[in-house]
Amino acid sequence: MISQNAIDTLRHTEIGTRGLFIDGAQSQGIAGATLPVISPIDGRVFASIADGNTADVDRAVKSARMAFEKGSWSRAAPAFRKKVLSRLAELVEKHADELAVLGVRENGTEIGMAYKAEPLSAAGTIRYYAEAIDKVYGEIAPTAENVLGLIHKEPLGVVGVIVPWNFPLMIGAWKVAPALAAGNCVVVKPPEIASLTLLRLAELAAEAGLPAGVLNVVTGRGAVTGEALGLHMDVDAIAFTGSGPVGRRLLDYSARSNVKRVFLELGGKSPNIVFADAPDLKQAAVVSANGIFRNSGQVCVAGSRLLVQASVYDRFMDELVSATTRLKVGDPLDLTSDIGAVSSAEQLDKNLGFVARAQIEGARLVTGGERILAETGGSYMAPTIFENVTQNMQLAREEVFGPVLGVMRFDTEEEAVRLANSTVYGLASAVWTANLSTAHRMVRAINAGVVHVNTYGGADITVPLGGVKQSGFGRDKSLHALEKYLELKTAWIAL
């Protein structure tokens, strides 16, 4: 674990202006424009990044295409790719302190969570796919004896990766690692407010021996660089995590360009369901509080809708409020802080807008609901709980992506299922019960890509993550993620 001394040393490291990473080296944007990087810790500018444009994206895609066609990576033996990616995993671990603090300075995630969820998780993901790729086999079809049917698995080509600002390194690794392991070349478009760790990852990849052009990073505004990547005729696939509206635009870009594959992990409004027979209501309350309030609620699978059975509602709410008020919000680079900063002033304003609307619509504010620590200049918000929430309220229907929890009560299992599924999303969920039959029925009944039982969060790289309905399609994590980045080719051979 990182020490406070290391954090305090790294928090003041000068960054300066970071360029794009194209063809194995840093490169300034063609227009020379830059964007400021504002830390949500104190509201101050601490670095700047290149504000790339369409021409920069084109340079990066051309570099990736040339590298792919050259074949030094795409046609290399899986054992070679495994060796390079394993070295990259080691380098990410070696630089874990640096990467963790750098990321926190950008997006405000509390350092205890960031250290595990960003560099350590990314290193583990890269190592997982490095180890997996030389165990992926082609197939022989069951044909007549005078025919040999072979099914080859080949890389797609150039993959565009667009990731969000909440966990850019972790989510970036979920996409970049399997894409690279499969032999593809990649162009990453990081979030405007959190690009630095992915730029550093590209540098470490070059140090690990990744050939030039195989991994490129183009920073800039999504409306420019993201659109250019989505519309590019020489990009074979886009892997995206982010909002629903942007996901829809990427589908449109695909239709307007080369019908590239698009894989979407979008929003969620995940139900966290507590039955009266939950094994430990106090523990369920503690985990539920963490499941919505850690990282200031800026987690795609956050349990933002809490459904509690009526017979234990009052008791559970007492435990929930107690667990919530014990959480310390503060400087995310202080190891004693349980919750860090909201990612930006704009996101904080959006969160507070949800609070105001919930009160107008009749929800009862139990705790929180306001900006705190304003004297720091940073963006901090008290963990917020509303009860008396109904399905027609904005708070029950729309993703806040902030530390705001809506609580509802239910009587029967059937009602819990109805409430849980009364959303356009279907990313994650949880069920708390000591009854094995109830647990299995709920796992089948809930429309979500992930159903936790007697826990919330914590699923590792061995299992897939993705949603149903308007939470998107395609899966990150696990061996199934490799399927997105491999093309099937049939060879039908007359003997």
Image: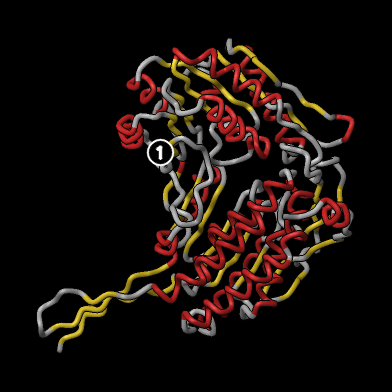
Tell me: residue 126, above or below residue 191.
below
Residue placed at 61% from the left, 55% from the top? 170
Residue 220 visible within the image: yes
Asked which secondary structure carries label 1, the reply is loop
Query: Quadrant of the image for the N terminus?
Result: bottom right
In-front residue for pair 347/210: 210
Instruction: Pick whichever, 199 or 383, lies toward us.
Output: 383
Q: Position of residue 338 (x, y in %)?
A: 72, 37
Are there few (<14), some (14-19), or many (20+) residues within 10 Å of tag 1?
many
- Looking at the image, can residue 56 be seen? no
Of residues 383 and 274, the one nearer the viewer is: 274
- Taking 452 as reference, is 494 left or right? left
On the image, which quarter does residue 321 sit in? top right
- Identify the residue shown where x is 80% and y is 59%: 33
Q: Which residue is mark 1?
A: 448
Is 132 on the left or on the right of 138, as rendered?
right
Horizontal side of residue 364 vs 131, given as left or right: right
- Quarter of the rendering containing residue 299: top right
Q: The C terminus appears in which quarter of the rendering?
A: bottom left
Residue at 20%, 84% (x, y): give it: 493
373 lies above or below 172: above
Q: Amino acid at mark 1?
A: Ala
**What residue is shown at x 48% (from left), y 30% (from top)?**
272
Q: Nearer the viewer, residue 151 or 295?
A: 295
x, y percent for residue 461: 50, 56
Q: Residue furthest front?
A: 280
